[in-house]
Image (cartoon, grey):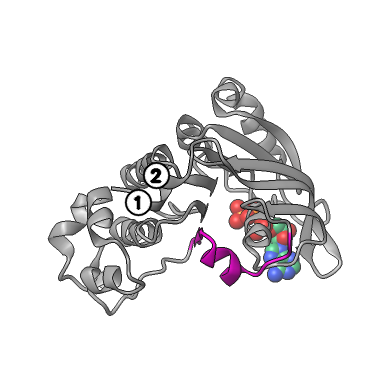
Amino acid sequence: MLKRQERTPAGETLLEVRGLRAGYGAGAVVRDLDLTVVSGEVVALVGPNGAGKTTTLLTLAGELSPLAGEISFFGDSRPQRLHQRASRGLGLVTEERSVFMRLTTMENLRVGRCDIDYALDLFPELKSKLRMTAGLLSGGEQQMLTLARALSRSPRLLFVDELSLGLAPLAVDRLLTAVRRAADDGLGVLLVEQHVDKVLKLADTAIVLRRGTVEMAAPAAELRERFHEIEASYLQGGGRSDHHDDESVEVSR
Ligand SMILES: Nc1ncnc2c1ncn2[C@@H]1O[C@H](COP(=O)(O)OP(=O)(O)OP(=O)(O)O)[C@@H](O)[C@H]1O
């Protein structure tokens, strides 16, 4: 069962962001972004390709320096790099599968001192694959292992960027269910996901980003009712106005 998350009181503010400007060099890709993540909550960040979701996540994680704005991490507003935030309880799962392909599933779980019982409790389907080389697992199983490794290090706050890229719908459901379960156990989650219909069913709050600014921010249940507006936002394109928009819309229900 979850350990450290259980010690985080539900509703504790883990991340507070005000007036974030983020980008590369002098150019702002993301402007005026506010968001809050509390323990036990999944906040979904959605929007068309090029809207600035990954830029936001990398900036909040400490991989990119913010251009302006305030980022308060576990109540601390001092600038910090990723390794500092990680040591204080941030987990980061990017779209690249972070498994060691030549190691077995079990060896992958052992590396980084994961809580193996918790990992297998989250993903019992990995139990029969423990001796298999991770490179031979299916794409969905590799992402289960990625997520299991991240969650079993007991983060207090988890950033997830497009975990489900290229996976079949059932595998996506399986991964998102595990994210929801971890949040129910006390984790705070900021989730970037292309499958908007799926994510609005499991998130507490959703933020729709378009062209680097927040177009909608509301309880996910409310945005489910406004799904057609989100679809329209995707169809209008998300990239910066000086970029050619080449959208892949994955919002069908
Ligand atoms: N290293 C970089 N240098 C300069 N511009 C970049 C860099 N990485 C991304 N961008 C630009 O920043 C903008 C936002 O990109 P970002 O990857 O944050 O969008 P996204 O919403 O995550 O898109 P996607 O859903 O396609 O992953 C895009 O216009 C992109 O071209």
In the rendered image, residue 84, in percent from the top left (x then y), is placed at: 59, 69
Q: Quadrant of residue 44?
A: top right
Is the CB of mark 1 within 8 Å of ligand 1? Answer: no
Give the vertical position of 33 relative to 77 (above or below).
Answer: above
Examine the structure image and report whether residue 90 is included in the region drawn in magenta.
yes
- Seen from the viewer's position, the closer of residues 185 and 165 is 185
Please say if the residues under marks 1 and 2 sit with CB atoms less than 8 Å apart: yes
Which quadrant of the frame does ligand 1 lie within? bottom right
Q: Decide if residue 127 is on the left or right side of residue 149.
A: left
Residue at the spot 69% in from the left edge and 35% down from the top edge: 233
In the rendered image, residue 25, in percent from the top left (x then y), is placed at: 82, 70
Task: Read off the residue under disc 2.
Answer: 6
Q: Quadrant of residue 210?
A: top right
- Seen from the viewer's position, the closer of residues 113 and 232 is 113
Q: Decide if residue 147 is on the left or right side of residue 52.
A: left
Name the outermost residue toward the right: 26
- Seen from the viewer's position, the closer of residues 141 and 38 is 38
What SS does tag 2 mark? helix
Residue at the spot 86% in from the left edge and 67% down from the top edge: 26
Q: Examine the rendering and report whether any part of residue 60 can be seen.
A: yes
Task: Read off the residue under disc 1.
Answer: 3
Is the CB of mark 2 within 8 Å of ligand 1? Answer: no
Three-letter amino acid code at the position of disc 1: Lys
What SS does tag 1 mark? loop
Q: Residues under labels 1 and 2: Cα distance? A: 5 Å
Range of the magenta residues?
A: 78-95
Residue at the spot 51% in from the left edge and 46% down from the top edge: 189
Residue at the spot 49% in from the left edge and 36% down from the top edge: 10
